[in-house]
Amino acid sequence: MGVPAKTQPNQIPGWGKIAGLNHVVIIITSLNLKRYHSKRIEQTINMGTANYERKGQMTIKMVYMTAGNMDEASRIAKALVQRRLAACVNIIDGMRSVYEWEGTLEEAREVVMIAKTHAHCLPELEEAVKGMHSYDCPCIVGVDVSDGNNEFLDWVRAQVNPGSIIKDD
C-alpha cells in the first residue's frame, strides 16, 4: 500500500489521531500485510511445485547423466526408453569434463544424456544406468521440473510406466 507523498499520518484511513496510536496501527497493519504477503508467496511457491503434481499427477524429473562415448550413451538411452524408465533421452556429444579421480587431475571427452522421467522411476533408472555403465561412479543427477509445456509433460507421464517395464532376457 503506497502513501501519497504529501499525506500526513492522521489523514490516512485507519490511522489514529492520538499520539502513539499511529505506531500500534502501523505494527498491526504491517503484521497483517506480512501475513498476507507471506501467504501469497507461499501459494505462489506451492503452485510452482504443485503445478504438475495436482490431480494425482507425478513429478517429472530431468536426469542429467554422462557416458564415456556415443556407443555407451546410445545403448543406455535405448534401454531406458525400451524399459519405459524414460520417455526420451537426449544425447549430446562433444562435452569435455575436468575432474579429479583417485588423486589425479583428469580431462576427458564425454557424452551428455538428459532423460525425462517420473520422480518415482529415478531409483530404478539409476540402478539400470549403473548396471550398464562403464564408470565406477557414473554421474546421475535428477532435477525436478516445475514448469513447462503441459502437453509435453503429459506425454512424458504417459510414456513412462514402470508397471510395463520390458525386462532383458
Image: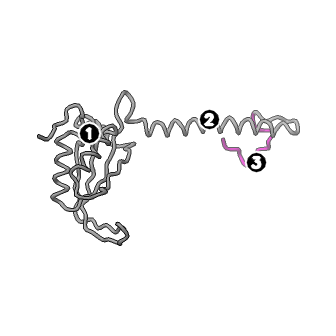
Q: What residue range appears in magenta?
A: 1-13
Is residue 142 toward the left or the right of residue 129 in the image?
right
Q: Position of residue 38 (x, y in %)?
A: 60, 38
Q: What element carries label 3?
A: loop
- Residue position marked by numbered label 2 in the rendering: 36
Where's residue 62, x and y in %? 32, 47
Residue receiving disc 3 = 6
Give the residue at x 27% y 65%. 95
Identify the mark nearer the N-term, 3 or 2: 3
Please identify the quadrant where the C terminus is shown.
top left
**Outermost residue to the right:** 19
Mark 3 nearby-residue class (10 Å; few <14, some 14–19, many ≥20): few
Of the image marks 1 and 2, the number of the one nearer the N terminus: 2
What amino acid does circle 1 point to?
A: Val
Mark on residue 156? Answer: 1
Toward which corner of the image does residue 25 lie, by quadrant? top right
| Magenta span contains residue 9 | yes
Q: Nearer the viewer, mark 1 or mark 2?
A: 1
User: Picture coordinates of residue 93 (x, y %)?
Assistant: 22, 62
Q: Residue at x 24, y 41 (%)?
A: 85
Residue at position x 19%, y 35% from top? Answer: 165
The prevailing secondary structure element of the residues shown in magenta is loop
